[in-house]
Amino acid sequence: MVNLETLTKLPLPQHHPSRVPRVIGDGESIAFVTENGTVTWWDFHNTQAPPVFMDLVSPETGGHFGVYVGDAVSEKAIIPKRQGYVGDTNVLETVLGDGTVDVIMHDFVPIGERLLVKRLTIKNTGQDERFLQVMPDVMHNPEIEMDLEERAGGIISRNHQSTFSANFTPNVGESHYSIKSGETIVLNFALAYGDDTSLERAFHLDDDIVTGLYGRTIDHWTNIVSKLNLPTSEELQKNTKRLALGMLLLLDDKTGAALASPTTSLPSVPFELENDAWDYRAAWLRDG
């Protein structure tokens, strides 16, 4: 069984308050991911649902989902180096490293699958064997009362509004990994929401399935961008593509309505909660 107390106390690298989190989604759910790969906002079922993770509003207490990767000997976390989207897609890539270990983390929401997937590719680029600890770190929004069910491979959280499951299968009974020089390991983590059938999907995602989901997600966004009528300037093309990809996340997948904002009750300056300028995510009739 998963030790939930351990999962919520791991020392994840702190996100920098001046950096705006990146967004991923599929038109039904939207998530914000910080520079260290931690999901700090996630609402699902629809973009008007209460967020199950909201550290973006209440740092350290609002709920989040991340994965701790650290040296098992020194107990130091592997630190983030860079972050960006994979090509012309809404698949996010976060790279962490410490000189001899590279961690490539891909966060994405497969289209129509009711999943949020976090895939870690860990490679030892040094000459010596490395001993790493890799553990999921999850805490849901405490303002949402949920019944927590522990099970082999993860958890299922339920209430009348939000039900989600979390797959921690790679780390059940084994959170420490010995990685030889030149060796690469791949670990997959997933969150699922919806009915019981959807919830079970999180616990049955082997590497082949995740590889397929990743490929189809890349193809989905790439195909959409390829149909855009773009300006001639290379710089404007890049900006137009990214703007279109962001705008598509604000279109409701069922109605096509445009959302005013993907979040609710956020200050205009990230992490500065004393600021009184709050945003909204309802669509005004004149705008939608």
Image (cartoon, grey):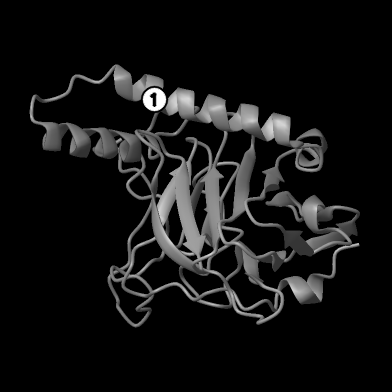
Query: Outermost residue, front direction?
Result: 127
Where's residue 57, x and y in %?
A: 46, 70
Position of 239 compared to 177: left or right? Answer: left
Where's residue 157, x and y in %?
A: 77, 56
Q: Is residue 40 above or below residue 10?
A: above
Position of 200 compared to 69: left or right? Answer: right
Q: Residue at x 25, y 21 (%)?
A: 228
Residue count near mark 1 (Cα–Cα under 10 Å), binned few <14, some 14–19, many ≥20: some
Where's residue 12, x and y in %?
A: 58, 73
Q: Is residue 93 above or below residue 87?
A: below
Q: Residue at x 39, y 59 (%)?
A: 82
**Which of the two residues, 256 or 99, is positioned nearer the viewer here?**
99
Where's residue 271, x and y in %?
A: 38, 75
Position of 15 compared to 198: left or right? Answer: left
State which quarter of the image contains the C terminus: top left
Q: Quadrant of residue 78?
A: bottom right
Query: Outermost residue, left direction?
Result: 233
Q: Residue at x 34, y 83 (%)?
A: 274
**Secondary structure at numbered mark 1:** helix
Q: Residue at x 40, y 35 (%)?
A: 89
Q: Is residue 120 above or below residue 134?
A: above
Residue 141 visible in the picture: no
Q: Quadrant of residue 237?
A: top left
Q: Quadrant of residue 3?
A: bottom right
Read off the residue under disc 1. Answer: 222
